[in-house]
Structures are given as structure tokens and as C-alpha cells.
Amino acid sequence: MTKKRNLAILGATGSIGTQTLAVVDEHPDDWNVTLLTANNNTNLLIKQAKKYSPNTVIIANEQNYTVVKDALKKTSIQVQAGQQAIVDAIAQETIDIVVAAMVGYSGLASTLKAIEHGKSVALANKETLVVAGDLITQKLKEVPEAKILPVDSEHSAIFQCLSGEKLSSIDKIWLTASGGPFLGKTKDFLSTVTPKQALKHPNWDMGAKITIDSATLMNKGFEAIEAKWLFDLKPQQIDVIVHAQSIIHSLVQFNDGSIKAQCGLPDMKLPIQYALYYPRRKKNDWERFDFADYATLNFETPDKETFTNLSLAYEAMGKEGNMPCILNAANEVVVQAFLDERIGFLEMSELIAKAMQKLTYKAHPTYQDYIETDMETREYVCSLIR
């Protein structure tokens, strides 16, 4: 009988977290869930804790500590609160693999800590590499036993295409984009869209923030930056192609002109399971792709003039330094403001561009520089929204 592996899920109540637990439910003999964390969703965290009996649960929002503590007082589960508690738990827990599914910048510190302690990190938090890809890659060099296993469907696709290949043989990659709910729409149309409309993604089941990022194409820009660090690529080697059916998840062209593509139905459980079980595959009984259902697969170039976030992301990727950190922090603020109906859809790109022009650029930032850049950017963009 195979020994169970110890699993930590950071962001257990979000879309990736819940789908990770769905994978665990498919193969319960393979996993001990030892750590679960959430930001605000106390009800679901409590429900998960009672079902999976982890050693520790952590609620990041300290105001919710008492609610979780009281609900679990009859169990042996240790309840903690705060972002620092999450970072500390990564160091102390006997964990084999960490699923980093926290949303936004908050995932950086815990991912760095997991790498420092030689963990395998199933990385769904793309902002970690967007903000500080240089720090992450340097830390991986210092701790060679640690691994980053991509969970994003596009990066998982590239990762799978590169099995048995050398990074030096890559000519270029294509990240496929669904185009989101507003594919083909004009700026006039986008000027009036609501959060409710933007949250209706045509193919993927995702959280609110990433769904808005998909609608603005910022998600694809983030993925381009993430791919740069994951696969040691230059910006000119990374291209985006719109593929509305979301069957081909990404492609690699090699230096001999041949192309590999990874395909499958749009189901996030597939890349999650691949990361959890890497380097082997695990049989499942999920729905299979049927060519008869897809007589044609369609592709088109993205409309960068209408969806300017993609160009802003490529600009930040080219400049490097703390510019991607500015991009990310500004984006987190404007997405929340849009969801709160305080700004319009097109204003998100406008405010991000202003932040990139205004904030101080640092070519070789330290970890502390990233913290300060993130804070200063948020304060500046919030001042524009007020």
C-alpha cells in the first residue's frame, strides 16, 4: 500500500482549493490533508475542517478567529489566525506538497517559505511569480530539492509538452486564451458592462478575481509573465492566441519547427491532479474529450487595442524590476473596485496605466522593495478611485 502524502492547501475555500479537495475525494487513500487555510470564508473552512480533520486550520482574517475556534473546539484541530501564522505553519508542518491557491499578492510570503523548506509547491497563485519571479527563481536555485509544479491549465500544458525536452530547444510558446465573456466586443460595449456580466465565464469555473482578469485579458498577461520565469523565456518567445473553445490549453514550438500541444476538456481538476501526482499520471473516471463534438478548432489573434491590459502586462514584463509588482497591485485594487461597482470596466486599464507611469521604478528590487512597492501602489490607486 502506498504511503499517504501530507497535503497543505492555502486558499482551501476558493475555486482551486475546493477543486483540489475534489481530487483528494477521488483518491482518499493517497492523501492526508494536514493544513487548510482561508481568508474570510469561515463557514466553508469549518465544514472542510470537520470533514478532513487537518492538524491545523488558519483563518487569515483575524477578526474571524473566534468563530472558527468556537466551531472546532470539540475537535483536536489547532486553530490559528493571521497571514504570519500561515507562513509559520508552512515551516513547521510535516508537509510533502503545498497547494498555493491564495488569491493575489498575499501568496508570495508563504510560497517563498515553502521553497525555503524544500517543499513541492503546486502553484496556482500566479501573482507570486508575476510580482517577484526573480526572488522565486533564485530561491529555487538555492534550495534544489524544492519544486514549483504549475497548476494553471496553460502552464501545466507547457510543462507537459516539455516532458523529455530541453528548455534550450524552445523556439516559442503560445498561451491560449478563451477570450473571456467579451470576446469580439467593442469599447463602446465594454464601457457599460456590469460585474455580473463579467463574471459569466464561457468555459472555466473560477473565482471572482481571476474571472474578471480573464474578461480584461490581464489574466493572460499575468500568465505570460509567469511563463517567462517558469520556463526561462524571453518576452518575444511568448505569444498569446485566442482559442474560444478552450480545448488546446497551450502549445510549444521547438527549434526544429515542430509543435506540441496539450489538449483536453476545460476542467481544472486535470492540471491540479497532474501537479499533485507528478511525475506520474493518475487514472480517473472524469469526462473524456470526443473529437466528434468538435468538428473544428478556431483561433484568432487577441484584440490588444480594445483589451489594453495585455499590452500593459507585456510592457511590465519587458521592464522587469518592480514594474510587474506595480501592475499586479494596481490590478488587485481596480478589480475589487469594479466588483464593488465603484468604477467601470474600461477604467481598470486606465488606472493601471497611470500607476505604471507614476510609481517609482526600481530595476533590482529586494523583498522589502516589493513590499513597499505593493503598498505604495495600492495607496496611489485607491486615492485615484476616491
Image (cartoon, rainbow, N blue to C red):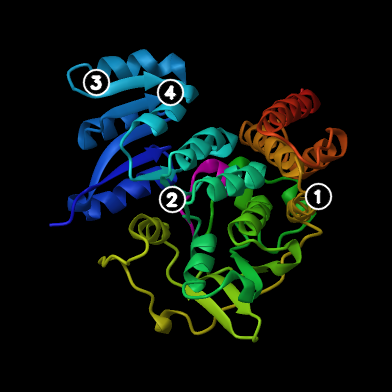
Q: Are marks 1 and 3 in contact (CB under 8 Å)?
A: no
Q: Say whether disc 4 or disc 3 marks the residue closer to the N-terminus.
A: 3
Q: Which residues are magenta?
A: 203-212
Above or below for 107 versus 64 = below
Residue at the disc numbered 4: 85
- Please state if 332 lies on the left or on the right of 9 as rendered: right
Quarter-wise, where is residue 242 in the image?
bottom right
In the rendered picture of this protein, how many numbered marks are placed on residues?
4
Above or below for 375 versus 94 = above
Q: CA distance from mark 1 to mark 2?
A: 30 Å
Q: Amino acid at mark 1?
A: Lys
Q: Say whether disc 1 or disc 3 marks the residue closer to the N-terminus.
A: 3
Q: CA distance from mark 4 to mark 1?
A: 34 Å
Residue at the disc numbered 1: 319
Q: Is residue 39 something that shows in the picture?
A: no
Quarter-wise, where is residue 227 in the image?
bottom right
Q: Is residue 184 something that shows in the picture?
A: yes
Residue at the disc numbered 2: 145
The secondary structure type at the circle numbered 3 is loop
Q: Residue at x 66, y 62 (%)?
A: 183
- Please state if 283 lies on the left or on the right of 121 as rendered: left
The secondary structure type at the circle numbered 1 is helix
Residue 164 at x, y = what percent? 47, 75
Quadrant occupied by the C terminus: top right
- Please state if 258 lies on the left or on the right of 41 as rendered: right
Viewer-nearest of discs 3 and 2: 2
The secondary structure type at the circle numbered 2 is loop
Q: Amino acid at mark 4?
A: Ala
Above or below for 171 versus 183 = below
Q: Residue at x 39, y 55 (%)?
A: 272
Q: Are marks 3 and 2 in contact (CB under 8 Å)?
A: no
Q: Amino acid at mark 2?
A: Glu
